[in-house]
Amino acid sequence: MKNYVIDDLPDYFKQYKKSIKNPKKFWDKVADENFVWYQRWSKVVDYNMEEAKIKWFKNAKLNITKNCIDRHLNERGDKMAIIFEPNDPKEEAQHISYSELRDRVCKMANVLRDQGVQKGDRVCIYLPMIPELAVSMLACARLGAVHSVIFAGFSANAVESRVNDCGAKMIICSDGSFRGSKSIDLKGIIDEAVEKCPTVEKVLVVKRTGSEVKMKEGRDFWLEPLYEKAASDFISVIMDAEDPLFILYTSGSTGKPKGMLHTTAGYMVYTAYTFKNVFNYKENDIYWCTADIGWITGHSYILYGPLANGATTVIFEGVPTYPEPDRFWEVIEKHKVTQFYTAPTAIRALAKESYEWVEKHDLSSLRVIGSVGEPINDEAWHWYNDHVGKKKCPIVDTWWQTETGGIMISPLPFITPTKPTYATLPLPGIQPVLMDDKRNEITGNQVDGNLCIRFPWPGIARTIWGDHQRYKDTYFTAFPGKYFTGDGALRDEVGYYRITGRVDDVIIVSGHNLGTAPIEDSVNLHPAVAESAIVGYPHDVKGSALYGFVMLKDSGEDRDRDNLRKEINNVISDTIGPIAKLDKIQFVSALPKTRSGKIMRRILRKIAEGDFANFGDTSTLLNPEIVEEIKNEKI
Ligand code: WT7
């Protein structure tokens, strides 16, 4: 187990050095000693960073559900695998033991197989945060189908483009979902999407809200009756190390969403290893990550990482402020949560409430608290540290991405001294490098640059589904031979990393990754809009909010501007989802453009931020006079 658990700071440095000097040997040991395999690998890693071809544990055979469920049954059959905390605190929590989880997953896998799903088929899952979501994913993995979870807040259009991109044969959805005081008609959204999804043969519907839904004969099936009569045994399918496990869509700075493909063995090894160490996981802990399973955080650190360690993981259906703004604290107290992992946006929102909401609850079970998704600002860090961690729980500020599969840079609790707003040090096996714009590596400390990673790690996504060229172009060409993260970072005097934010056109709103281009495309669909430019500006709860500069086809003087703003946001809601709605919309008579026709977003960003002092070099602008107008009319 020596390569699996990091004991203290000297041990971290020792392991880190070892892992960099000989990554093959390091990961070979981790994989060999901590998982069950049908067959060992013939080679630990095979890679070509120029071609973006990466394989880990070549020719190994395994099934991830054997590692996440079956192998725990002897010692931990009755131990809780999942605690489900419903949206409504009056509804009883569900405790699902490892042996019950095994039965549920087997039954579900049998249902899927009976409905025609086979190894390699894609299954889209559009479910709220209920146990069936986890069970569906694991059932896919058990039979070798590739799951693609679509966050159940996305619109019909967004669902349709994802389902068609991966060519899913089946969609698993529910009648509806509960979120705070609202209930949402998920089946209606699927009905609309699936009309334009020719590859979908079956829609499996989980009953959650009990609301009335339409069922299409021959296509739509309620899960319950099928599940009731399914056998509770299912021999897991033997998978190759590099067989696809799942596809998860993430926004790019341009074009359609990227279907990041994660494969089986490397992803399993990496999420399990990082979970154990970053959360200082111990046998009787109750671990809770508040993310939605529809994002990578949920895949890696609600489901696969914790279950691979035989942990108890909480699945929470609700929202932080329902019925009151102490819901998180109440759940921590109720289930005696030991590790709590959430996002800066949630921390900032809750910090706005009186801290009596926190004081009301006994949070003494907590040992480690974590943050993920965007930079955590100083104020939020301290509030989290003082009021939630009571200055005794280390904060793990974990930096990583959908593409990286697992946590890359993070303090190790009780080992790495934390520093507010710093993700601190790379985990073993991870080699961050800072690069300047001329593709030179920046060495030494107290420097900043583009954050790249030098050597592959087991959890890295292997490709973009159906578009390897785009994968190569996006991540491996800007800095040849290295993986480019799209983030900027600085390295302080002791070598700690601080992520400074995106250096491309991705804006992170409330922890959600949004590309500006798809939102602009969406705004431009409105019949009155000629052109638009979206930028981010600082927002005290969301981190960044969206500011749209919109040029209309006619002067728009005779229109009701507020109404137009609403309509534009409705188009965004319909085509992407409510999360991408613009906070501010300013109508402009033209956009500042360079002579080559590129919108100068840098200036728009400054205007949106209210920083009029220094627009930098505007000499390449074709229409400099417009800057003044936009500035004067800023809202
Ligand atoms: C982007 C990736 C990682 C799971 C959730 C987001 C930003 C993520 C941090 C952090 C500063 C962070 C980066 C990254 N980010 N964690 N601790 N500090 N920035 O996954 O949607 O793929 O977004 O989130 O900009 O590139 P994602």
Image (cartoon, rainbow, N blue to C red):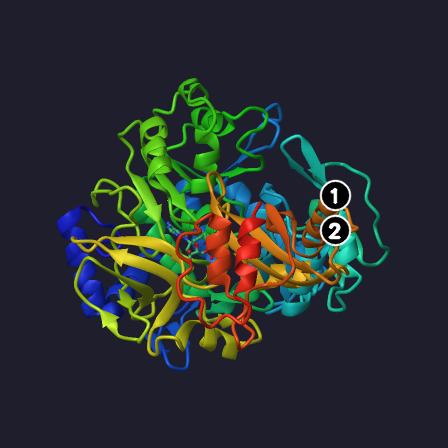
| Residue 573 image position (x, y, % from top left) | 68, 50
Query: In the rendered image of this protein, does residue 381 appear above or below residue 615?
Result: above
Q: For this rendering, which residue is in front, 198 or 540? A: 540
* Rendered view: 559 above or below 212: below
- Ligand 1 is found in the corner quadrant, namely bottom left
Which residue is most to the left?
A: 10
| Residue nearest the viewer, comparing 481 with 226 | 481
Asked if the residue at label 1 sits under 8 Å from ligand 1, the reply is: no
Q: What amino acid does circle 1 point to? A: Asp
* x 70%, y 52%: residue: 568
Judge the density around disc 2: few (<14), some (14-19), many (≥20) Cα neighbours within 10 Å: many
Q: Is the residue under label 2 in contact with that under label 1 (CB below 8 Å)?
A: yes
The residue at the far right in this view is: 217
Is residue 610 toward the left or the right of residue 466 in the image?
A: left
The answer to whether one can see residue 598 in this image is: yes
Q: Which mark is residue 384?
A: none
Task: Give the percent coordinates (x, y) of residue 347.
Answer: 43, 36
Q: Is residue 278 left or right of residue 243?
A: left
Who is closer to the viewer here, 429 or 223?
A: 429
Q: Position of residue 402 (x, y in %)?
A: 46, 59
Describe residue 581's horizontal placement relative to residue 28 as left or right.
right
Residue under the point 17% across and 46% down:
8
Q: Residues within 10 Å of mark 1 (few under 14, many from 20)?
A: some
Disc 2 residue: CB within 8 Å of ligand 1: no
**Which image quarter: residue 379?**
top left
Q: Amino acid at mark 2?
A: Ile
Disc 2 element: helix
Residue 185, numbered circle: 1
Q: Secondary structure at mark 1?
A: loop
Q: Relative to 390, does residue 538 appear above or below in the rendering?
A: below
Q: Which residue is mark 2?
A: 189
Find residue 587 and report its horizontal and vertical position in percent. Answer: 65, 53
